[in-house]
Amino acid sequence: MTTGFGRAVKRVLVGAAMVSAAFLTAQGGGAAAQTLAALPMPSSGAQELGQARPIVGWVEFCARYAQECAVDVSEPAQISLTPRLWQTITTVNRQVNTSLRAVTDQEHWGVPDRWDLAEDGSGDCEDFQLLKRKLLAEAGLPRRAMRMTVVIDEKGEGHAVLMIRTDRGDLVLDNKTSAVLPWHRTGYTFIKRESQEAAAWVSLGGATAPTVTANR
């Protein structure tokens, strides 16, 4: 059940993304030319290396929110990153990071790992990223190009980020920073991500696969 606080957070974030997009569109080609230099430099994307076992928390989440895990193969597998879309992505990343309260699943739900959409305004890493994807999809980005991804972070712990596949490389949205970075500049070890072909996961080559993504 979505609380009043959760609905308010959602309205604020969707509004912020749409206002940013409308502003850049209204400025026309001149604004696009001025902001093109701010886009990430083109780089290679992360390479898939076969199938991988899904995180249990993701499987349980998909049973509750099937539409959030469904893959529409008619959607683009990557987006063409324009200044307008870049502004929308960075705005949503920053607003979610500053609007939600970070709390572990053990503190929040009394279990090691539970994936949710932070309807009550609180959550840990995967909840931040799932909400970002939901809001960005509502703003018009193809869900297929936005993949939940499991990494090993700077503490050696399992961590979830959102990877957006673009024509300028794979970009990472992270609740630990409001900077949207190319995947290879995060300092993380990339383990696996959601497939773009089905409700499944693919390996990204990391040697150790965590069973949970339980940090904040």
Image (tube, rainbow, N blue to C red):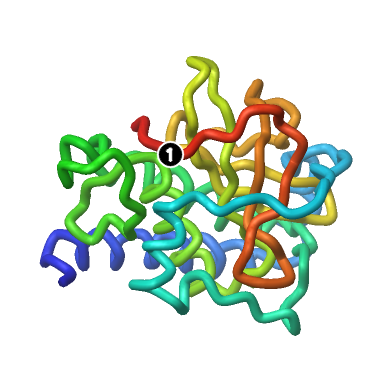
Q: Is residue 111 left or right of residue 48?
A: left
* Residue at 27% in and 55% down: 118
Q: Position of residue 10 (x, y in %)?
A: 30, 64
Q: Which quarter of the figure is the C terminus placed in?
A: top left
Q: Quadrant of residue 140?
A: bottom right
Q: Position of residue 26 (x, y in %)?
A: 61, 70
User: For the view shown, which residue lies furthest in the bottom direction?
Assistant: 74
Q: Which quarter of the figure is the N terminus placed in?
A: bottom left
Going by the numbered disc 1, the residue's amino acid type is Val
The image shows residue 133, relative to residue 139, as above or below, that is: above
Q: Is residue 28 left or right of residue 70?
A: right
* Residue at 52% in and 18% down: 156
Q: Quadrant of residue 62?
A: bottom left
User: For the view shown, which residue lies furthest in the left direction?
Assistant: 4
Front-most of residues 148 and 81: 148
Front-most of residues 165 and 86: 165
The image shows residue 161, relative to residue 196, as above or below, that is: above
Q: How many marks?
A: 1
Q: Position of residue 72 (x, y in %)?
A: 66, 81
The residue indicated by pointer 1 is 212
Q: Quadrant of residue 7?
A: bottom left
* Residue at 51% in and 38% down: 174
Q: Position of residue 74 (x, y in %)?
A: 75, 84
Indicate the secondary structure of the residue bearing disc 1.
Answer: loop
Q: Residues within 10 Å of mark 1 (few under 14, many from 20)?
A: some
Q: Is residue 12 left or right of residue 43?
A: left
* Residue at 36% in and 59% down: 13
